Image (cartoon, rainbow, N blue to C red):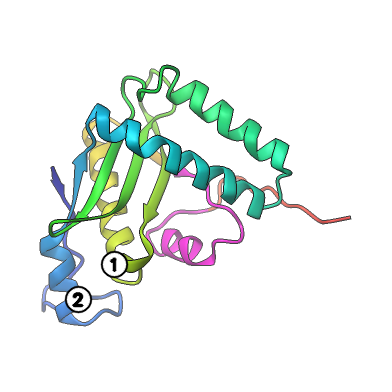
Amino acid sequence: MIAAPADLRTDGVPHDGRDRQTAAMDEHEVRLERMSDDEVADWLPTAMALYEQARREAGDTPEQAAAGRRASEQRFFPDGRLVEGQLLHSIRLGDEVAGWLWLGPWDDRGELWWVWDLEVHPSFRRRGVARRAMLAGEEIAREHGASRLMLNVFGNNDGAIALYRDLGYEVASLHMAKPL
């Protein structure tokens, strides 16, 4: 289990605009717990369906979205189990599951890591959960020898884009589309 780092100035005031009560709640309760093989098996259909839906919402045809889902499943879950080296965590807020964070190395060298998926359930959003999970994920990647952490975000996900920019992520590649 990994506890998320605090995000407070030395005077105890959050420097991300949250009130002290919210910051204190996040500091003490948001944590990551590695999923068991059974939890991964339960998670996989839901996560892949959300991924396929997000691809359609971002402009993929149903066929393209389904192909993207299949490619992800074949690369990372060839037998229904997560491949070695990839790390899938439940995001927990107190005793409740607030979402998940999946990250891992791009290749066997392990210097470049990716956040493959971050999901915070709707009832836990706007409470600093994603921020804390990302900061904890960054620490996990560092502990595993990563020197760079990358991610993809669909262009219609304004909230996630704002969060990642605020956390210091910069555009490394940009795909653009125009309906014809």
Q: Which residue is mark 2?
A: 22
Q: Position of residue 62 (x, y in %)?
A: 70, 42
Q: Position of residue 179 (x, y in %)?
A: 83, 56
In what quadrant of the picture does the N terminus appear?
top left
The correct choice, above or below, for 149 with respect to 25 in the image is: above
Query: What residue range appears in magenta?
Result: 150-170
Query: What is the secondary structure assignment of the residue under circle 1?
Result: loop
As shown in the figure, which amino acid type bears the numbered disc 1?
Answer: Gly
The correct choice, above or below, for 56 with respect to 121 in the image is: above
Query: What is the secondary structure assignment of the residue under circle 2?
Result: helix
Is residue 147 visible to us here? no
**Mark 1 surroundings within 10 Å by alpha-carbon count, few (fewer than 14), some (14 through 19), many (20 or more):** some
Q: Which residue is mark 1?
A: 128
The correct choice, above or below, for 7 with respect to 120 in the image is: below
Left or right: 7 as drawn, with respect to 121: left
Q: Quadrant of residue 103?
A: top left
In primary-sequence order, the first of circles 2 and 1 is: 2
Left or right: 4 as drawn, with respect to 98: left
**Mark 2 surroundings within 10 Å by alpha-carbon count, few (fewer than 14), some (14 through 19), many (20 or more):** few
Nearer-the-camera pick, 81 or 151: 81
Left or right: 90 as drawn, with respect to 57: left
Query: Which residue is farthest right?
Result: 180
The number of callouts visible is 2
Q: Residue at x 26, y 79 (%)?
A: 18
As shown in the figure, which amino acid type bears the numbered disc 2?
Answer: Thr
Q: Residue at x 29, y 71 (%)?
A: 127
Q: Position of residue 69 (x, y in %)?
A: 57, 34
Query: Residue 54: which disc?
Result: none
Tell me whether circle 2 and circle 1 mark residues in contact (CB < 8 Å): yes
Is residue 99 visible to us here? yes
Q: Residue at x 39, y 41 (%)?
A: 149
